[in-house]
Amino acid sequence: MTAKSAFLTAEWRKLAIANYSIDADLLKPFLPHHTELDIREDRCYVSLVGFMFLDTRLRSIKIPLHSNFEEVNLRFYVRYKENGIWKRGVTFIKEIVPKRMLSFVANTLYKEKYETLPMSHSWITNEPFIEVEYKWKKQTWNSFKIKAEASETPVNINSEEDFITEHYWGYTRVNKLLTSEYGVEHPRWNVHKVIDYKIDVDFGKVYGNTFSFLSNEIPCSVMLAEGSKIIVRSGSRI
C-alpha cells in the first residue's frame, strides 16, 4: 500500500508523561467507533503528556509564529484491527495549545478536541540533571514538572515505557459511527531516568468531571522521553 502524503512534520521534544491506571468503563464513552481499549497486563492507562512542537511545518510550509509551541494533552490507548492486523494508537480527551489558529483548524477541519490556553515551559540542564516543566492556565495555573538524569537510555522492548511511547496511529471520534485515522512516524525514543516530579493539575476543571479524581491520584509511573523528528501522515475515515 502506498504511504499517504506527509501532512505535518515537526520535532516532538522533552515529552513529560504521567500515567494513571483507570477504570476502563470510564473511557468507553470516549472510544472512537471500530476501536477498542489497548490494555497492558490488565491495566488501562490514561496519560497526561506535556511536550514541545519545534520546527512545525504543514505540507512542508513553515507557518509564521506557529512553528514552536507547547502542547499538553490527556490521552488513552486504543487499537484497531485492519485485515487481521492490530494497529495500536492513541485517542485524545483534550489537547491544549497556546495558539488559537491551531485549535480552530484542528477542531473545524479534523474534529479534534483542542483548546487554546496561555502556556509556558522551561527546560533547565544542570549536569547531571535536567528539569522540564510545562504550565497552562485555565482560571488558575496548572503545572507538570519533572527532574531527571540528563543522560538518555533506550526504551526496553516490552516494557511499560515501550507500551506508552510505541503507538503509531491516532484515532479521533468524529461521531458515533465515524472515526478518523492518521499515522505517526518516528524512531524509537530514548528516555531520561526520572528522579522526582510534581503535578499540580485541576483535572476536573481542565478535562471534565469524569477525570476530576485524577487530581488526588498518584500516577503509576512518570516518564521523560527525549522525543525526535516526527511525520504525521494524511488521514482517512473508517
Image (cartoon, rainbow, N blue to C red):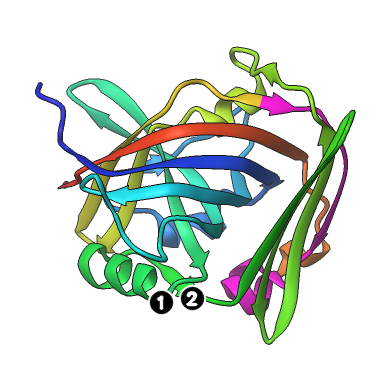
Amino acid type for the residue under numbered disc 1: Arg
**Which residue appears at 65% of the width and 19% of the height?**
159
Secondary structure under the numbered disc 2 in the rendered image: strand
Quadrant containing the N terminus is: top left
Is 154 displayed left or right of 229 in the figure? right
In this view, the residue farthest toward the left is: 2
Q: Position of residue 51 (x, y in %)?
A: 59, 49
**Up-down relation of residue 184 to residue 75 (above or below):** above
Q: Position of residue 143 (x, y in %)?
A: 75, 64
Residue range highlighted in magenta: 191-211
Question: Dot 2 corresponds to which residue?
Answer: 116
In this view, the residue farthest toward the top is: 157
**Which residue appears at 39% of the width and 54% of the height?**
31
Q: Position of residue 218 (x, y in %)?
A: 83, 51
Question: Dot 1 corresponds to which residue?
Answer: 100
Q: Residues within 10 Å of mark 1 (few under 14, many from 20)?
A: few
Q: CA distance from mark 1 to mark 2?
A: 6 Å
**Which residue appears at 17% of the width and 23% of the height?**
83
Q: Residues within 10 Å of mark 2 (few under 14, many from 20)?
A: some
